Every structure is written in C-alpha cells, then in structure tokens.
Image: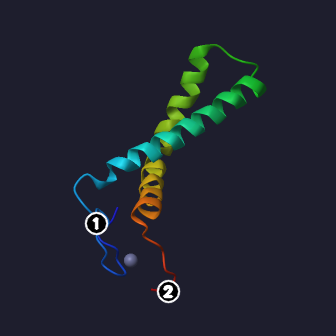
Amino acid sequence: MYEHCPHCGLRYEVEPGYFVGAMYVSYAISGGVALVIGFLLFYFGGDPEGWVYAAVVAPVMLIIAPINFRISRVIWLYYVAGIKYVKGL
Ligand SMILES: [Zn+2]
C-alpha cells in the first residue's frame, strides 16, 4: 500500500499503529467468509467430516489474505478516520 495518497499526498497511517484496528475488520471479514463456506459445505456438501471444513477454509483464507488486508485498511480509513474518496481530485 502507498504511504501517502498519490493524488493529494495525505498520509494514510495517521499515527503509529493506526492500522491495528483494521485487524478487527479483517477478522470480521474472514469470519464471515469462513461462516459462508461452512454453511455451503454443510448444506450442499452433505455435512462432511471436520477436517474437510478446515481443508477448504484454510486455503481460501490464504487466497483472500492480500485482498482482505487491503479492503480492511480501506474500510478502517473510511469509517474510522472519516477519509472520503473524492472523484476527480
Ligand atoms: Zn488523496
């Protein structure tokens, strides 16, 4: 991620450790994805054994990690810091 906004030069990390809070957003996103996968396996996969749930959820978590990392920071910036995207700036 950029340290500063390429358009207006805004420093994203307002203070040291500012993005620690994005960890909670990330946790909520991964929890939601894991829950959806769990329900899908339960209802459409015929409720497989426990290890199957883990074997499916773990790789998906690794695959979505880079996206989740960025989305969480964006959500954190947008809703906590109140930074808004202005089109055409
Ligand atoms: Zn900007």
Instruction: Judge the density around disc 2: few (<14), some (14-19), many (≥20) Cα neighbours within 10 Å.
Output: few
* The one of 24 and 53 positioned closer to us in this rendering: 24
The location of residue 76, given as percent across then percent down, is 43, 56
The local secondary structure at tag 2 comes to loop
Q: Which residue is mark 2?
A: 88
- Image location of residue 48, percent across then percent down: 68, 16
**CB of mark 2 within 8 Å of CB of mark 1?**
no
Q: Is residue 34 left or right of residue 77?
A: right
Counting other residues with Cα less than 10 Å from the Cα at mark 1, is it few (<14), some (14-19), or many (20 or more)? few
Q: Say which amino acid is labelled 1.
A: Glu
Q: CA distance from mark 2 to mark 1?
A: 20 Å
Query: In screen coordinates, is 71 left or right of 51?
Result: left
Kindly indicate the quadrant of the structure image that contains residue 3: bottom left
Residue at figure coordinates x 55%, y 24% from the top left: 55
Q: Quadrant of ligand 1?
A: bottom left
- Label 1, secondary structure: give it: loop
Name the quarter where the C terminus is drawn.
bottom left
Q: Which sits earlier in the primary sequence, circle 2 or circle 1?
A: 1
Residue lying at 41% horizontally and 62% vertically, measured from the top left: 77
Q: Which mark is residue 34?
A: none
Give left or right: position of 12 versus 84: left
Q: How many marks?
A: 2
Q: Is mark 2 within 8 Å of ligand 1?
A: no
Residue carrying label 1? 3
Residue at x 56% of width, y 30% of height: 57
| 63 lies above or below 14 | above
Residue 50 picture location, percent across and down: 60, 15
User: For the residue marked with disc 2, what is the amino acid?
Assistant: Gly
